[in-house]
Amino acid sequence: MKRPVILLGLAVTAFGGVLLAQESPEDVREFRSKSGTRMKAMVVGIDPSGKVLLQRYAPSAVSLKSLSPEDQAYVREWQERHAKEQEFIRDGWLNERYRDPGITILKGTMRTLEDGKWKPYEPANVENLRYVAYYFTKEWEEDRFIKSVSDTYKKLRKRYDTVEVVYLTLGKSDEAVRTYIEEKDVEFPVLDPSASGLLRTDAVGALFKGTYPQLVVVDRQGNVKADSFVGKNEASTFSETLEAFEKLARDAAREQKATTENP
């Protein structure tokens, strides 16, 4: 008796109502012949002659509207449940990678500006982050340092995924930050202005010494590795801080490469 094909893991796309196949269940595997031919199937038995009985696994895409009302309701419930599960998994993934005090504030708060609107930003490899440079400032025309910070960021991010720079506004106007980011052509991400209250409770907030702009480089544990602040009556050392940041990036990349080559 032929075993019926069971369609598992169907999802509904957001726009078109089409069902798409997800990952195969555990008892489905890809079989390969000696000649290299491949076939995804489930083992359903072995006949008396010793031949393996394989049930091909080929999920089908069908229109959601073609299903019965009961099945449509079931699929929509599955979609909602699946979305919540995926969000739970993603949140756990982020919590693990942002668990250190030097970078926890970044989870879910980073933004970049595109066409005048904030867009969520996430480093490509959060787990590889070793150092973050926090740039504290208010939006002011006399800021002579932000371009140097932005240029350094562009250069480093082309080569390394171990460092990040984040703009932390000391102002209160979301619109002022947007305008400033566009005028100064800032390349690095911004801590969402609406989340600036987090600075009062996060360890990163304690890094600000009261004189802006200030650039502070910390490791994942929040240890200060470089700081442009020298004293309220002394000139900030931005060039030295950026040089130290670049050196930290190079050293981290070398260590990362050595670990990869000699696990």
Image (cartoon, grey):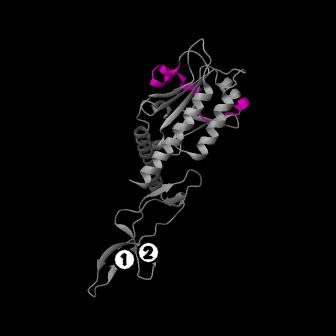
Disc 1 marks a residue whose amino acid type is Leu
Other-residue count near label 2 (Cα within 10 Å), few / some / many at <14 / 14–19 / ≥20: some
Q: Position of residue 243 (x, y in %)?
A: 59, 33
SS for dot 1: strand
* 149 vs 105, nearest the viewer: 149
SS for dot 2: strand
Q: Residue at x 64, y 24 (%)?
A: 174
Q: Report the magenta residues as a range.
A: 181-208
* 199 vs 50, nearest the viewer: 199
Q: Main secondary structure of the magenta part?
A: helix
Q: Residue at x 71, y 34 (%)?
A: 185
Is residue 29 visible in this depiction of the protein? yes
| Residue projecting furthest to the bottom | 49
Q: Residue at x 44, y 75 (%)?
A: 39
As for residue 192 lying within the magenta part, the answer is: yes
| Location of mark 1 (residue) | 54
